[in-house]
Image (cartoon, coloured by chain):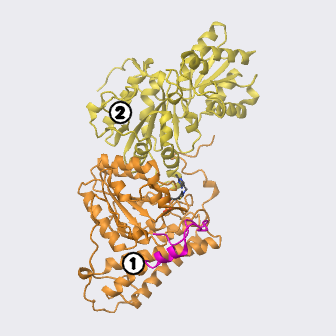
Chain colours: A orange, B yellow
Amino acid sequence: MLMTRETRSRTTAEPRKPSKKTAKKPARKKTPTAGPRPHAGPDADRVRLLESMLRIRRFEERCVELYSAATIRGFVHLYIGEEAVAVGVNDALGPDDSVVATYREHGHALARGVPAEAIMAEMYGRTTGCSGGRGGSMHLFDASRRFYGGNAIVAGGLPLAAGVALADHMRGLDRVTCCFFGDGAFAEGEFHETANLAALWRLPLLLVCENNLYAMGTAIGRHEAQTDLAARAGSYGMVAWAVDGMDAEAVAASARRAVTAIRGGAGPHFIEARTYRFRAHSMYDPDRYRDRAEIERWKAQDPIGLLQARLRQETALDDGDLAAMEQRVLDELESAVAAAEAAPEEPVADLLRHVTSRPPEVN
Amino acid sequence: MTTAPPEDAVTTYREAMRDALREALSGDERVFLIGEDVGRYGGCFGVSLGLLEEFGPERVRDAPLSESAFVGAGIGAALAGMRPIVEIMTVNFSLLALDQILNNAATLLHMSNGQLPVPVVIRMTTGAGRQLAAQHSHSLEGWYAHIPGIRVLTPATVEDARYMLPAALADPDPVLIFEHGSLYNAKGALPRSGTTAGLDRAAVRRSGTDVSLITYGGSLPKALSAADALAQEGIEADVVDLRTLRPLDTETVAASAARTHRVVVVDEAWRTGGIGAEVSARVAEDSFYDLDSPVERVGCAEVPIPYARQLEEAALPQPADIVAAVHRAVN
Ligand SMILES: Cc1ncc(C[n+]2csc(CCOP(=O)(O)OP(=O)(O)O)c2C)c(N)n1
């Protein structure tokens, strides 16, 4: 119901979605390929978006099993339903760009290219985890991919992201910093301080608000006086728009447009991705605050199903390709789980490592 | 080229701090200063006066009144290869940035398994004594000393004002520097040859055999003046300047206690749960059998610092209070 809300920032119009007419291409003649190779050819990028979403979905479904078996613990926030946002935005970023994410960041990390194995090992708290077992689900980091977390404080990543962007800006580097956050962050001062700072200094910052309509159990209409988020962001003097966050291609096109403008020196951009989480807020949440019919309505717009259907219709993607993709993803996850199971635990003797860069304080 | 060793110069704490900033800005392209009114205004306490003209608005960067955003931006810029020096007007306002300091600066190295060091320096004033009332006068550096992952410095002398900053910038971890507001006009000798004191050791500022006064920052001059008064009565005080509140140099404290057998802890924070409580506990743990009397503490009255002069003076530790505590300890 909220998706039909026609609130658009007055600052700009939403970027055009690729129309079916122009996007539709003649079916490619299939050539037999040896083994389950990723798709190549003119539709490869679109297929990669799909596979990336599928990897996130299956990764998290595996997390549910492992959590139920008490193998992994802690707060675990699932991204299921929202995959199109991380995947679409990451599609527009290059390897030198930076990402700052939230505690619901399995999807952001995977889309960024952090190996499933390193993330799974982190869920297990193992030495080979991307944070050496010190972070867990909510604190994934990968400096080599400029993935700065993993932040469990609502809105806490926003000032940091402005700083990363400021550093790049001051050093004359052609880099964009992307910060993901939820609609809940709009109620925090840190969002507004950062928006002002970034617009004032024209920082190369892409703000991506994942509006899934809820902050834990509080619906957006009960936590925001003004729910047109793009309009509010636009009021800071940055370019802002909303996009269908269930459509990975629309998100990718939107993000590409923003990133191109930011690289051109246009200053920070804001994208409100309208999305929905299919699961509860976290594994602890009994999800009593929303009605089942609403969830079912949104599931009908499953971003994976949507892109699958579109690719079947518009490209040569067929059942065989889909089955091969599914198998690739499952194999990758199974070996990630096996590697995590086999990885050593971080030794307790190393408890005080990395509190400071110096040897541990003994006094 | 050889030059004769230069003479020690007499300068103020403020000028020493400014020289340190100037040296940092000219020595390293990655260094920049960010904070409210650090540029055109010249710094709320005049510390950065003139630096904008010298280094330009990119590197002496006036920030909006957004403690959380500009402190967090300093932290983010440090993550991305810069060496920011963030100035917060006073420790009271740093509370608006506590999330960034505690939840990001202090934790990222550990949570990332060593992948994300945060080489940021955050300076701020602390302390009372200028009739600014409760919201501009508190001494909260002890709260920050509670936090693993950061270093807490409290320069009390002109020499430390000049040389702690470069050492802080060389530290790969977040460093917080607390400058007591009453010290900016203090004058002192500055050894031009540089200091070897580093950041890890406390300093014995006056040697004595009868009692140890353990203090730091703005309370150091008061402890020294109490020591002068005590010397008139033949009581020689050993005055230890902690210099760094985290990590604490407990060895220097214990060595002093072993010399004098009596310890008085002096600081401007509230006694309950304060840094003085921590130091007393360390003395009890490390020096129990060296002590001839219970540890005495002189701190702030348990009250928000009041405005009226006589009330503020009564709330704060004064040399006479220190002398009285020493009398209790030596009797
Ligand atoms: C500063 C802060 N306050 C409260 C919380 C507890 N909390 C965790 S997630 C959450 C809801 C945030 O919602 P939103 O920003 O919309 O993100 P979403 O979880 O929907 O992705 C809350 C209140 C927190 N982590 N940080």
Residue A86 visible at all: no
Of the 4 image quadrants, the one containing the C terminus of chain A is: top right
Could you say whether the residue bearing mark 2 is in a helix, strand or loop?
loop
Q: Amino acid at mark 2?
A: Val
Label 1 marks a residue whose chain is: A
Q: Is residue B178 above or below residue A225?
A: above
Q: Secondary structure at mark 1?
A: helix
- Mark 1 residue type: Leu
Of A2 and B67, which appears nearest the observer?
A2
Badge 1: few (under 14), some or many (20 or more) residues near its Cα, within 10 Å? many
- How many numbered discs, if any? 2
Residue A311 percent location from the top left of the image: 34, 83
Quarter of the figure with residue B272: top right
Q: Main secondary structure of the magenta part?
A: loop
- Residue B38 is labelled as 2
In this orientation, does residue B246 appear?
yes
The residue shown at (38%, 80%) is: A307
Residue at (49, 44) in percent of width and height: B101
Tell me where residue B12 appears, x and y as whole percent: 41, 20
Label 2 to label 1, Cα distance in Å?
50 Å
Left or right: A199, with A211 as reference point: left
- Let me know if residue A294 is in the magenta part: yes
Quarter occupied by residue B310 = top right
Does the beta carbon at disc 1 come under 8 Å from ligand 1?
A: no
The magenta span reads: A276-301
